Image (tube, rainbow, N blue to C red):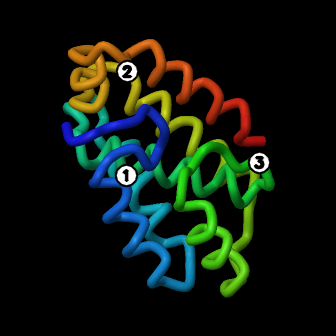
Amino acid sequence: MDAWEADAFGNDTANDWLAEVVETSDLQMIHDAFDTVLGSGDENIELQAGEEAYAAAEIVAWLSGHPGKTGDHGDLIEGWMENHELEFSEALANKAKKSIDRAFNHPSELREAWEESDDFDEWKSELTKLKDRLV
């Protein structure tokens, strides 16, 4: 895992994914990230899929008016939101919460990677805070 912080955009995968998202004009990539994780059933969630779903959930929190820590990415997300008609819904927030829960629980390469780090508790705390902001 190439991560340096426990927040949603603290890794290269999420940064690359966000760069693609802001080139779009709708929420399709966000739905796709959630669908990949939620559609996994009992199968192992790959690291990249988990990281993208985590980043997608953060964007949904921004859409709800409850942004979190995003470092330099806040301006990028805000600009994207201002330039497109993107609609927040409770159903989207619920999908985000379910995706976070699924990526956190086994089997999940994302969780396994964080369990092997010294920052597992910080990552777990960031996920909990994100879920709380998804209102």
Q: As rendered, which of 61 and 77 lies closer to the eye?
A: 77
Compared with residue 120, is residue 76 higher up or lower down, i.e. above or below? below
Q: As rendered, which of 79 and 89 lies closer to the eye?
A: 79
* Residue on which the image places disc 1: 52
Amino acid type indicated by mark 3: His
Compared with residue 34, is residue 38 higher up or lower down, i.e. above or below? above
x%, y% of residue 52? 37, 52
Compared with residue 49, is residue 81 higher up or lower down, i.e. above or below? below
Q: As rendered, which of 53 and 79 lies closer to the eye?
A: 79
Query: CB of mark 3 within 8 Å of CB of mark 2?
Result: no
Looking at the image, which residue is at 47% across and 44% down? Answer: 8
User: Could you tell me which secondary element the residue under label 1 belongs to?
Assistant: helix
x%, y% of residue 1? 19, 37
User: Could you tell me which secondary element the residue under label 3 belongs to?
Assistant: loop
Q: How many marks?
A: 3
Q: Nearer the viewer, mark 3 or mark 2?
A: 3
Check the image and name the residue furthest to the front. 72
> Does residue 96 appear to the left or right of 50 in the view shown?
right
> Does residue 11 appear to the left or right of 130 in the view shown?
left
Could you say which disc has been placed on residue 105 in the image?
Answer: 2
Distance, label 1 to label 2, CA atoms, is 16 Å
* Residue on which the image places disc 3: 66
x%, y% of residue 57? 55, 48
> Does residue 50 appear to the left or right of 79 in the view shown?
left
